[in-house]
Structure formats: C-alpha cells, structure tokens
Image (tube, rainbow, N blue to C red):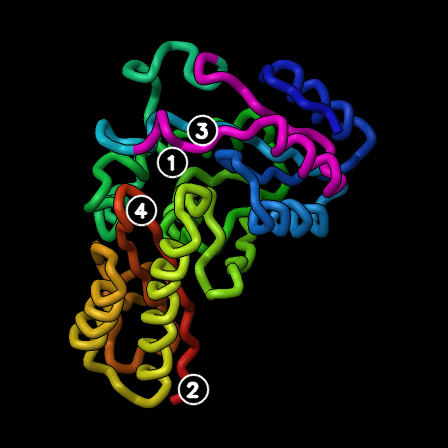
Amino acid sequence: MKQIHSIDEVRAAISAWREVGDTVALVPTMGNLHKGHISLAKLAAEYAEHVVVSVFVNPTQFGPNEDFDAYPRTLAADARKLSHAGMDIMFAPSVKEIYPRGLDNGTQVLVPGLSDQLCGAARPGHFAGVTSVVCRLLNICAPDVAVFGQKDYQQWIILRKMVADLHSPVRLVAGPTMREKSGLAMSSRNSLLDDAQRDKAASIFSALIGVEQQLQAGRRDYAKLEDEAAGHIRDAGLETEYVAIRRSLDLGMPEKDTPRLSVLAAARLDKVRLIDNVLVELSQ
C-alpha cells in the first residue's frame, strides 16, 4: 500500500489506473480507524478494482469549542490496518494541501435545510465543513464509487443530496453500522471512553431499539416515543441532545403511514459526543 500526502501524487496514481480501464473507490475517513472503517474499505473493494482511503481530520467541521485538538490521530496504526486489509492508497493530506488559501478564505459547499437540523442545530456549521471537504475529496480523486457509514445517517442523506444537486458522476454506497458487543456503535470517539463509560453509552442503542419495537407494535405517537427514549438515555447517565423519528428517505417529518423511518439520537457523556440511528421498515 502507498501512503500519499499530496494531491498531485494521488491524482497521478489514479490516472495510471484509469489508463488501463480500472475503476476506483474512495472511502473518506478522519482516521483512528476501527473495524467499522475497515468494513467500509472492504465494501469499497467489492465495487471497484482499486480503493483509496483518505485520512484527514477536517478542521472546518469542528466548532470553536469542540474536540479538534483532542481528536485521536493514529496515522501509523491506520496505515498498518489499511495495508493488512489490502487497500491500495492511504491519502493523508495536510490541512494546507486541502485548504491552500486558508480555512477562512476557502470555498464552501452548503446543503441548506438538511444541514441545519438535528446534529446541524447542535453543531452550527458542522455539515458545511463536511460537504465542503467531501466535495474536495471527490474532485481530487474522481472516484467511481464513494463509501460512507450508515452510523452518520444525517451526513449520508446530506451527501446524497449534494451529489445529486451538483450532478457529480459518483455512486454513493452506505455501509452498515458496526457495533461493539454491547450494541454501542463503533466510533473513533469511543477510544476516549473507559469501559464503564462504554457500558453507559450502549444505552443509546438500547433506547433506539426500544423505539423500533414500539413502532413495529403499532405505536405512532412519535413525540411521546422520542421523549421516552430520551429519558432512557438520561437515566443511564448521559446528556440527551435529541431523539428524533424521521422519514428515512429525506429526514422529513413522518406521517402516520410512513413505511420507512429512521430513529436518530445524539447524546453526550462527559465531553464525548455520540450519535447513532436505526432504520425501521414497518411491517404494518
């Protein structure tokens, strides 16, 4: 596996693949890779002959009081994991490489509406940072396929809209959420939690599963279900940011007969922010 830090070099490598007719997949990450990331990389390999995994802690998606400086950076370990997984390139650019004109003067890509609710309401500007950096990575690598995790479901919906609106010639693929034995969604931020905290954090998933079970049983009092789940998470010792039941297709507000729903949650445990979701296909 090659470890590449410059745009020119990664483009040259991809161009060589293109010359012989090979396809390319991109898996954007912020590093500190875990089994969930590796599962996305392996999924990407099912869709293309070559896989580029980007590792870039993007400063523009962190707010002024968020954990950019504390975000885990494990580049050497990430490289070993990707090499063992058989990836072709780890693209690990510097901030200057991605934002050559500086963070305050760079072009932004905005997806209005969707970016301002749920996690976007709690983290103003976060999704503008996400869409702006993903758009750059897609332009740099020009992949046939880009793979993202379902755990960041709001991000997934926003990126789908961005790609559709900009007529980007890339296929987006979502990989399923990988979980620890407790049900806790795998996340790079889990490394900031001790064992006792991880047990508490598993309450997020159990709350979401409880909502799914109630929905399957026929309940449609969405607001009350959200409140009950939020209370379950609070009782475990977390600060609940939100629990929301939305249409899976576009995160709009559901009707009583909406057949496909997403139940999303965000909560904080000490200084660590955690998100999760479950998708619900109603049988009645």
- CA distance for labels 4 and 1: 17 Å
Nearer the observer: mark 1 or 3; the answer is: 3
Indicate the position of residue 187 as horizontal and vertical percent values.
Answer: 46, 48
Q: Which mark is residue 175?
A: none
- CA distance for labels 2 and 1: 34 Å
Nearer the observer: mark 2 or 3; the answer is: 3
- CA distance for labels 2 and 3: 41 Å
Q: Residue at x 32, y 62 (%)?
A: 264
Tell me where the magenta segment starts and ends, as one range. Answer: 67-96
Mark 4 or 1, nearer chain start:
1
The residue that disc 1 covers is 130
Q: Residue at x 33, y 67 (%)?
A: 263
Mark 1 or 3, nearer chain start:
3
Taking 63 as reference, is 190 left or right?
Answer: right
The residue under label 4 is which amino acid type?
Answer: Arg
Q: Nearer the viewer, residue 183 or 90?
A: 183
Nearer the observer: mark 4 or 1; the answer is: 4
Indicate the position of residue 254 as horizontal and vertical percent values.
Answer: 26, 71
The residue that disc 3 covers is 57
The C terminus: image quadrant: bottom left
Q: Callout 2 environment at 10 Å: few (<14), some (14 to 19), or many (20+)?
A: few
Indicate the position of residue 251 as horizontal and vertical percent values.
Answer: 31, 60
